[in-house]
Image (cartoon, helix red, strand yellow):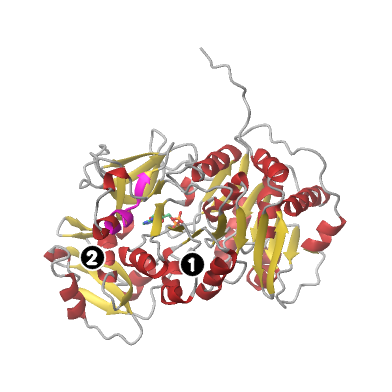
Amino acid sequence: MHGLMQDRPLTLPHVFHRAERIFGHKSILTATVDGESRVTYAQWAERVRRLATVLDTLGVSAEARVGSFAWNTQRHLELYFAVPCTGRVLHTLNIRLFAEQLQYIVEHAGDEIVFVERSLLPLIWPLADRLPGVRHWVVIDDGADTEIPDDPRVLDYEQLLAVAEPFDGRFTVEDEDTAAALCYTSGTTGNPKGVLYSHRSTVLHSLISLTADTLGLGERDRLLPVVPMFHVNAWGLPYAAVLCGADLVFPGPAMRPGALLGLIQRHRVTVTAGVPTIWLGAVPLLGDYDLSSLRMVLGGGSAVPKSLSEAWRTGAGLPITQAWGMTETSPLATVASPRSHHDGLGAAALAGVRASQGQAVPLVDLRIVDPESGAELPWDGTAFGELQASGPWIAAAYFGGGSDANSFTGDGWLRTGDVATIDAKGFVRLVDRTKDLVKSGGEWISSVELENEIMAHPDVVEAAVIAKPDERWSERPAACVVLAEGARLGTEDIVAHLTGRVAKWWLPDEVHFIDEVPKTSTGKFSKKALRERFYPSGVLPGA
Ligand code: ADP
């Protein structure tokens, strides 16, 4: 028997019209090169309506992919709604990709038009002639003095909006499974792959961010998304914020720690989100700002070291809340907030809970699987295997690439490529990424845990552990360590620090002191670059 409830699609037009109608007085602020600009939701909504008309007037086709090459700004948020509310697909382009990768994904996606920030033109305009499919390049003038090419393909965002009539009436997208946004994985493993979010997945994912045990985002929040809007839709936070009418504070191009902390202080930001690298850079400055308005600092994209979260707890009064996810999971899949069964734990044990990846959010199912036998492993906190995920905002296939067996299982679960344990209460602890595991004498060593322990040394800023090829053990751990300014440590100091904290056979064989851990385009440790630098010959044959 079917239920007798109304069948209404879950689509972004609902989110837009709700915000326009009831949150018109709320504010969207953007830091600019020469100050700050602020609009109300009502003013923003009117501009979204104009932008919708612009897309039609330019002849952008009904299901077009529309590229954006932009900072976190109010104008980017205009694209976030005008594009999908008119049935088109917003393809957010990662501004840190190399030219060849950029060309590859624009071509692969079939972008018809690209909206590009003036300051970012030098990174993408040189590709224009190699991308004949892109008919229009719309320049968003962010106040930079970059030269604007004199070319018929180049248009000005504000001029287009100024002459456009605002779209009149309600946006409609009949089918909730219509694609809304496209984001390519950063390609740390092979070619970038397109993850195609639907209206339904985006709305449900936004809704989950509003639930109390997840992020609890609400109308009273002032949200500063530091994580780029080109990276998994800034973790879906802009959509969630508009759904609940939270005030938004966008950092624009100013991503320096001081600029971000200044925004938090000035605008009494309550929730902010970014990758650990950003929060690490802010640690030395925490005492210089009033951060008392913050109720949540979200960290994810790579493991949040215990020492970093603790540095925030002591320096800013709140630890970092860790979340785990991937481009393929929209990305919110787990959040590590201590639960009632942790009540009464001491500070050190709680820090340990926060250093895990946390519990799956509602509607996301997880399992761990033995990669060899394919058997599901018990949730006992020790057995580890490949983490697999399923849920309504988790990818089922890649755009134009089908559902390859390396990425999806026969029964339709996503293979995350992460290796994890799960405890009896569902707390996930990431051990490693499959390709980063160190296998020594047939036993796995968790580089994530080893890094955490090395970074607990007060003179260590960052540490990345990689596999060093070894005749006898096949692989041994090697640590690449960045020291705090002025600190002097040798290999023996790192080993002495680790002794007693980790099993003896986990102690790194080599420690490389480096100036900086190389990062990927999304700010993660690039272990590939480290392996190429220190062990270019790779794993020994037969290992
Ligand atoms: P890419 O695969 O290109 O790096 P993603 O941004 O989709 O792009 O990365 C997802 C991966 O990032 C996860 O599979 C995981 O390895 C890592 N990751 C994300 N969040 C965390 C976290 N909280 N702790 C550890 N690793 C994380």
User: Marks 1 and 2, how far apart in space?
Assistant: 50 Å
Q: Mark 2 highlights which residue? A: 540
Quadrant (top left/top right/bottom left/bottom right) for the C terminus: bottom left
The part of the image, by quadrant, that contains residue 34 is bottom right
Residue 126 appearing in the image: no
Q: Residue 241: x percent and y percent?
A: 59, 50
Helix, strand or loop for disc 1 = loop
In the image, taking residue 484 as reference, residue 500 lies left or right, namely left
In the image, taking residue 520 as reference, residue 16 lies left or right, namely right
Q: Are marks 1 and 2 in contact (CB under 8 Å)?
A: no
Tell me the tag on residue 452. none
Q: Which residues are magenta?
A: 351-359
Q: Residue 284: x percent and y percent?
A: 41, 77
Check if residue 45 falls in the magenta segment. no
Looking at numbered disc 2 in the image, what kind of residue is underneath it? Leu
| Mark 2 residue crowding within 10 angstroms, few (<14) / some (14–19) / many (20+) | few
Compared to residue 391, the image places residue 115 above or below, namely below
Q: Residue 35: x percent and y percent?
A: 68, 73
Looking at numbered disc 1 in the image, what kind of residue is underneath it? Leu
Residue at image point 59% right, 45% down: 244
Tell me the tag on residue 291. 1
Task: Please tell me which residue lies in front, 276 or 184.
Answer: 276
Mark 1 / mark 2, whichever is N-terminal: 1
| Mark 1 residue crowding within 10 angstroms, few (<14) / some (14–19) / many (20+) | many
The part of the image, by quadrant, that contains residue 470 is bottom left
